[in-house]
Amino acid sequence: MNPVRNAIVVGASSGIGRALACVLASEGYRVGIAARRLDLLQDVANAIGDTAVVKTIDVSKPEEAMRRLRDLIDAMTDVELFVISAGTGFENPTLDWEPEHETIAVNVTGFAAIANVAVSHLQQRGSGSLVAISSIAALRGSSGAPAYFASKAFMSSYLQGLRYRFAKLRLPVVVTDVRPGFVDTAMAKAARKFWVATPGEAAREIVAAVRKRKKTVYVTRRWRLIAWIVRATPDRIAERLGY
């Protein structure tokens, strides 16, 4: 009989995080689910069944979030897979400070705090996987959502640094940067959308990529083409298009 595998999904109350928790549970993982709202987490736990371990974590409060994540790891004894799916973002063309501040607090400070705890555990464990939901938005800045796009660039760069760190330590820890395009969640706020995936489709592609130990994943796969176009677009043209 195969031993039970443990995973933690931070940001599991809705969207891609919720779908990932359900897919992982269906594949035999005992899943620790964490997010800010307990009522939504209980809904996810009911969908998963008895294997779910519930913990409220508000990543906008980094020190408390780190402590509560350590408590969740202790409760599960051992965790081989961490998924960071918590995030927020706003269209903010007027550059109001409050949405900028909230985005940075969650997507930058909160993300780094959760990653710090996960990295410490995986380093001590000697193996495992760290997965974070970044975005194709990481590839270029935006006039309409400056903090959101910049925060995703921070995530991707931070994950790359963690990957290099594990390589330097010669530890078989896989760090996966997931860069979705449009997924049918509350975060997809663009007026015009295309190639929209369901959370379930996104989750299944992400889990398949984790299984293959991939470093960077575009969800769905066709968004790799858009990534190439974004990278190839000169700044002067991007400025005219109002990126």
Image (tube, rainbow, N blue to C red):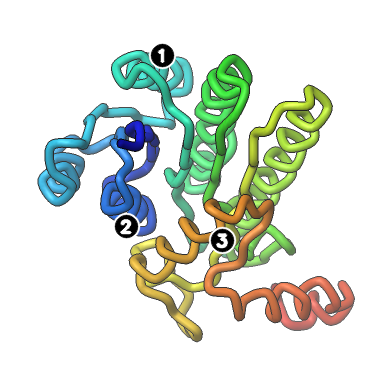
* Residue topped by disc 3: 94
Q: Nearer the viewer, residue 31 or 158?
A: 31
Crowd band around label 1 with a 10 angstrom C-alpha radius: few (<14), some (14–19), many (20+):
some
* Residue topped by disc 1: 67
Residue under the point 59% across and 18% down: 120
Relative height, residue 22 to residue 76 (above, below): below
* Residue topped by disc 2: 19
Mark toward the start of the polypeptide (3 vs 1): 1
Q: Nearer the viewer, residue 189 or 181?
A: 181
Residue kind at label 2, given as amino acid type: Ala
Residue kind at label 3, given as amino acid type: Thr
Residue 95 visible? The answer is no
Q: Nearer the viewer, mark 2 or mark 3?
A: 2
Q: Nearer the viewer, mark 2 or mark 1?
A: 2
Residue 215: image location, x then y, percent: 68, 52
Residue under the point 53% across and 26% down: 118
Give the quarter of the image for residue 196: bottom left
**Relative side of 41 to 24, left or right:** left
Mark toward the start of the polypeptide (2 vs 1): 2
